[in-house]
Image (cartoon, rainbow, N blue to C red):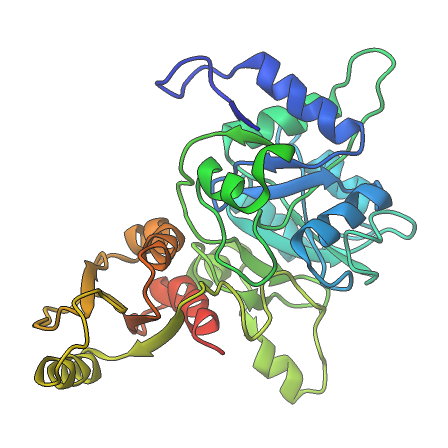
Amino acid sequence: MILSAYQFADGVELAPESIAAAANTVRAGGLIGLPTETVYGLGADASDAQAVGHIFSAKGRPADHPLIVHVAAFDGGAGGVAHYCRQVPAFAQSLMDAFWPGPLTLILPRREGVGAAAAGGQDSIGLRCPSHPVAQAVLEALRKPLAGDAEVWGIAAPSANKFGRVSPTTAAHVHSEFGDDLLILDGGPCEVGIESTIIDCTRGAPVLLRPGAITPAQVEAACGRTLLSKEELLAQNQPGPRASGTLESHYAPSATVRLMDAKALQAALDLLASAQAPDARPTIALYHRSPLYVRSPLVVAHRMPTHAPAAAHELFAKLREMDAQGVKLIWVEAPPEASEWDGVRDRLTRAAVS
């Protein structure tokens, strides 16, 4: 069931009855579809092991693959952090001050006996303070309950899709995955469009586990520390914690995704044009930035934005759109190597693993 999170179509004034319905569902141990600025999440009370278990089963997600816990912003995230974490390094606090609320997840040492199911059994936990007003309204309602209701400190919320598939950036995407049985708050299309940057803060230095909208240069400028890579830790025999959305194969549509540079794409398109098509129905979707000459009726072309934030914003919706066209292959022009494209390139690389 989709509920509008806003009173009116202008998307400004929140609908208190919708916010209350979502908060009550979480408090009762249920699941909700929750809009954030990155993607829509499948949310539950992070401290309720049974409710968290329902997230894993609904998604078909391994129970040792940790979830990100979302915390309220009205106190700067401090209450949620203090509840779930036993220690906050100074550089992690600097990152919170710079980027919360926003698309940054921090992996921090977990307090014993708190959030174990959401953490996938690890002694660390991923926390994020989202900037979306609907997510924050629900989180605040849970932290400031009516008399007699229990306080809920955070919502565990991975992306609201079946495990390994394309993340949802609209309420309709979530509904297509879970149907009417799930209460989904419609907060409009997600602004960022890809999942948060994840920084491990448990190793004495910041370590990038997953790229996102916040770039390495921005992280380093905010915390005054050199950002390490997962590969650098592994070279030192220091394996990092498991983190959400970092499996080799992820974010995949039903069609097979292939990444190529513009030259290889044009060569493949020319080869197709010279071959006789068995029918005129497109079997290949093309997603490209560079000018390409498409002559085959087997190919339906889509232009990728030339700026990284715009490409990230539409990426998952575009993958879903191309998949819905019934094609067997999605050919994608590889993103540039510039750091602002790291998040888009990461998602496409994982989507192309088969």
Q: Is residue 109 above or below residue 267?
A: above
221 horizontally vs 73: left or right: left
Q: Residue furthest front?
A: 278
Q: How many marks?
A: 0
* Horizontal relation, residue 300 to residue 211: left or right: left
Quadrant the N terminus occupies:
top right
Residue at image point 86% right, 51% down? 111
Residue 256 position in % (x across, y down): 40, 73
From the viewer's side, name the closer residue of 25 and 221.
25
Could you tell whether 111 is left or right of 3 in the image? right
Residue at the image position 15 percent from the left and 69 percent from the top: 290
Residue under the point 50% across and 33% down: 132
Give residue 187's position: percent from left, percent from top: 47, 30
Query: Residue 233 appears in which quarter of the rendering?
Result: bottom right
Q: Position of residue 101 (x, y in %)?
A: 54, 38
Name the quadrant containing residue 64: bottom right
Q: Is residue 292 left or right of residue 148?
A: left
In this rendered view, identify the residue nearer to me: 37 or 184: 184
Above/below status of 74 relative to 126: above
Which residue sits furthest right?
A: 113
In this rendered view, identify the residue nearer to me: 348 or 215: 348
Residue 182 appears in the rendering? no
Nearest the eye: 207 or 4: 4
- Tell me if residue 214 can be seen: yes
Q: Give me the residue at 59% from left, 68% from top.
A: 246
Q: On screen, 261 above or below 130?
A: below
Q: Give the answer, above or below, for where 114 lies relative to 233.
A: above
Where residue 221 sits: x, y (%)?
A: 46, 58
